[in-house]
Structures are given as structure tokens and as C-alpha cells.
Amino acid sequence: METEAVEAGKSVSESSVVMAQLMSHQDINTAGNVHGGVIMKLIDTAAGVAAMRHAHSNVVTASIDRLDFHNPAYMGDVLTLKASLNYVGKTSMEVGVRVETENPRTGERRHTASAYLTFVSLDPEGRPRPVPPLTLETDEERRRHREARARREARLAEKKKEKACQIQKESCG
């Protein structure tokens, strides 16, 4: 079996995504706000594109570490999603997404949501595939990388705890 060579490091800006979407009547829930699930799908799409750009391969969403809604969005608003890589492991990547809402009639902007998603790069057979390292160029990128590494360590510690609980066949809540 032939192994693929991993590309040289890539900068955060090489894979960053900015995506805009106008919210219409089909995006609205019974309370008159944009449905959270619509925003979640757009977040997953923007983050997935950023991960694919970095990995140059198919990717799958492995987890959503955190998703916070801050302000509502309404019909007629324009959602702008900004997605960029925060951390890269051997085959996985953390992508941060910021969602801003703009009322195009007034120009008012609101921070609507933020999320952190982990993606795994896949080879043509659907197995995890190595990804290029992340080249950090700014202090902001280094800060985001440090915070992402801490989230990764917390996730791994939680998985280890869950596994130990399963072995002991007890709830460790």
C-alpha cells in the first residue's frame, strides 16, 4: 500500500472561509427567529469547507466542542460566517466559526453565534488521513491555537475518564 506524503505547513489564511447567507421565511421558527438548526447547518458547512481547504481531502465532522448563541437573527437578515483553523493534529483539525448577523436595511450588526468543531481528514477508502501542519503567523492565531490545544486536552481527558468508567461499569457523572 502506498502512503501519501503530507504537505508542507499551511497558514490559517490559506483555508479561511467567509460565507454569507440571506435568511428567508423557510429559515424562521415559530418564535419569529432564525431556527437554531439552520444556523448550526451553516456553521458545519463553513467549518467543513475550511477543513477541506486545509486537508485537501474529504473531511467528516467528529464533534462540536462548543456552540453558543448570543443574539437572534431574523428573516431578511444576512448571516456572515467566518471559519478558520485553530489547531491541527495528525489527522484532525479544530475549526472556529463566528456568526455575525446584519440587518441590511439599517446596517446594524450583531454577534449571533460562535462554535468550535473538530473534523477528521479521510483518505479515499474513508480512513483517517494525515493533514498538513498549521503555520501560525499572528499573535491572535497563536492565542487561538493555545486555547484550542487546551480544549483538545480537556476532550481527551474526558474520553479517558469515560473509558475508565465503562471498564468499571459504573457511572462517573
Image: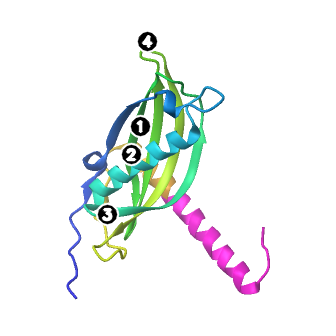
Q: Quadrant of residue 21?
A: top left
| Quadrant that contains the N terminus | bottom left
Q: Is residue 132 above or below residue 4?
A: above
Part of the protein shown in magenta: 149-173
In screen coordinates, is 8 left or right of 141? left
User: Which dot marks residue 81?
Assistant: 1
Queried whether the magenta region covers residue 154, the answer comes back as yes
> Which residue in the structure is indicated by mark 2?
46
> Which residue in the structure is indicated by mark 4?
105
Queried whether the magenta region covers residue 41, the answer comes back as no
Q: Secondary structure at mark 1?
A: strand
Dot 2: within a 10 Å radius of its alpha carbon, few (fewer than 14), some, or many (20 or more) residues? many
The amino acid beneath tag 1 is Leu
Which of the two residues, 96 or 27, is positioned nearer the viewer here? 27
The amino acid beneath tag 2 is Ala
Magenta span: helix, strand or loop, mainly?
Answer: helix
Q: Label 1 near label 3: C-beta < 8 Å?
A: no
- Give the Cα distance between marks 1 and 2: 7 Å
Q: Label 4 near label 1: C-beta < 8 Å?
A: no
The amino acid beneath tag 3 is Asn
| Quadrant that contains the C terminus | bottom right
Residue at the outermost front position: 26
What's the image's color scheme?
A: rainbow
Q: Label 2 near label 1: C-beta < 8 Å?
A: yes
